């Protein structure tokens, strides 16, 4: 009786999570659809005012480990030497009138939006089969494996894109107030998350194989 109740609780949790992901999925679809509708409008109506560009930048010298030396009042800070700000990251924001740049920026957003919907869809399908009483569906490990590679690939490509975009912008902007460097942000937490998902997919695949062998034995 307790095992049946535990199984029902797990299915209820899976169904609850799926409802949450369903809401997130349709909200993302709605936001993306509204953005796609507004894109051609903004491409022509906002030309005179300009479009806002947002690009990452490291504050200081050095991309991977930016360092900015600062001057302080030595009388108020006795005994302190070589004071610096390290690891500072920010964004360069500006208005521009380049339609190709605006469309390119929008294309990158569209790609990541599609990848996000793909990842959410995989999770929804996994939870749908689990909530339906089929956690050992052979497709679930494949879906989870695909999700893991999506997370790892998206993390690496995001870091690469941010660096290249930051380097491209800084090559065209002469900043004289503070030193800026191309941003190199390694999203290690997401890479580790993706690798853990891949490990979980491998374990799940083995569990599916054992469940299939047990069913054949019975």
Image: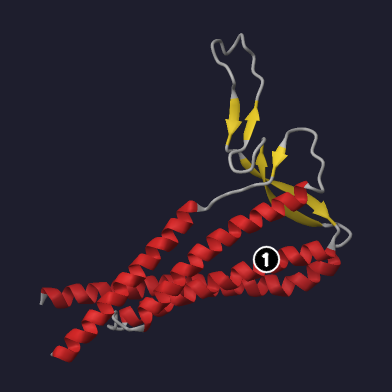
Residue 31 visible in the snapshot = no
Q: Is residue 150 left or right of residue 204?
A: right
Task: Tell me the residue at 28%/81% (across/down).
Answer: 136
Give the image location of residue 123, x and y in percent: 42, 74
Residue that protrudes farthest toward the right in the picture: 48
Q: Is residue 5 above or below residue 90?
A: below
Between 19 and 100, which is closer to the camera in this rendering? 100
Q: Residues within 10 Å of mark 1 (few under 14, many from 20)?
A: few
The N terminus lies in quadrant: bottom left
Give the image location of residue 31, x and y in percent: 62, 70
Task: Tell me the residue at 69%/42% (across/down).
Answer: 181
Image quadrant in which you'd find residue 122:
bottom left
Give the image location of residue 177, x and y in percent: 77, 32
Q: Secondary structure at mark 1?
A: helix
The C terminus lies in quadrant: bottom left
Q: Is residue 132 left or right of residue 107?
A: left
Task: Tell me the residue at 22%/77% (across/down).
Answer: 8
Q: Is residue 53 above or below residue 215?
A: above
Q: Is residue 12 left or right of residue 3?
A: right
Residue that protrudes farthest toward the left in the picture: 1
Task: Tell me the residue at 64%/43% (across/down).
Answer: 63
Q: Is residue 217 above or below residue 112?
A: below
Between 38 and 56, which is closer to the camera in this rendering? 56
Residue 208 visible in the snapshot = yes
Give the image location of residue 130, x and y in percent: 32, 79
Name the residue that disc number 1 marks. Answer: 108
């Amino acid at each position: 009786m307790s095992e049946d109740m535990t199984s029902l609780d797990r299915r209820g949790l899976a169904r609850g999570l799926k409802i949450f992901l369903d809401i997130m999925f349709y909200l993302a679809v709605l936001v993306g659809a509204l953005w796609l509708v507004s894109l051609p409008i903004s491409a022509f109506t906002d030309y005179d005012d300009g479009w806002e560009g947002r690009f990452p930048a490291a504050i200081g010298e050095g991309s991977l480990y930016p360092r900015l030396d600062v001057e302080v009042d030595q009388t108020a800070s006795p005994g302190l030497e070589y004071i610096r700000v390290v690891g500072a990251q920010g964004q360069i924001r500006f208005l521009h009138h380049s339609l190709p740049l605006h469309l390119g920026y929008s294309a990158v957003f569209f790609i990541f939006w599609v990848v996000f919907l793909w990842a959410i869809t995989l999770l929804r399908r996994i939870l749908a089969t689990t909530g339906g009483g089929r956690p050992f569906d052979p497709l679930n490990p494949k879906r989870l494996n695909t999700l893991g590679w999506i997370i790892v690939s998206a993390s690496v490509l995001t870091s690469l894109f941010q660096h290249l975009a930051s380097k491209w912008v800084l090559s065209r902007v002469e900043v004289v107030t503070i030193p800026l460097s191309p941003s190199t942000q390694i999203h290690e937490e997401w890479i580790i998350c993706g690798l853990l998902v891949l490990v979980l997919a491998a374990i799940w695949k083995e569990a599916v194989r054992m469940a299939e062998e047990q069913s054949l034995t019975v």
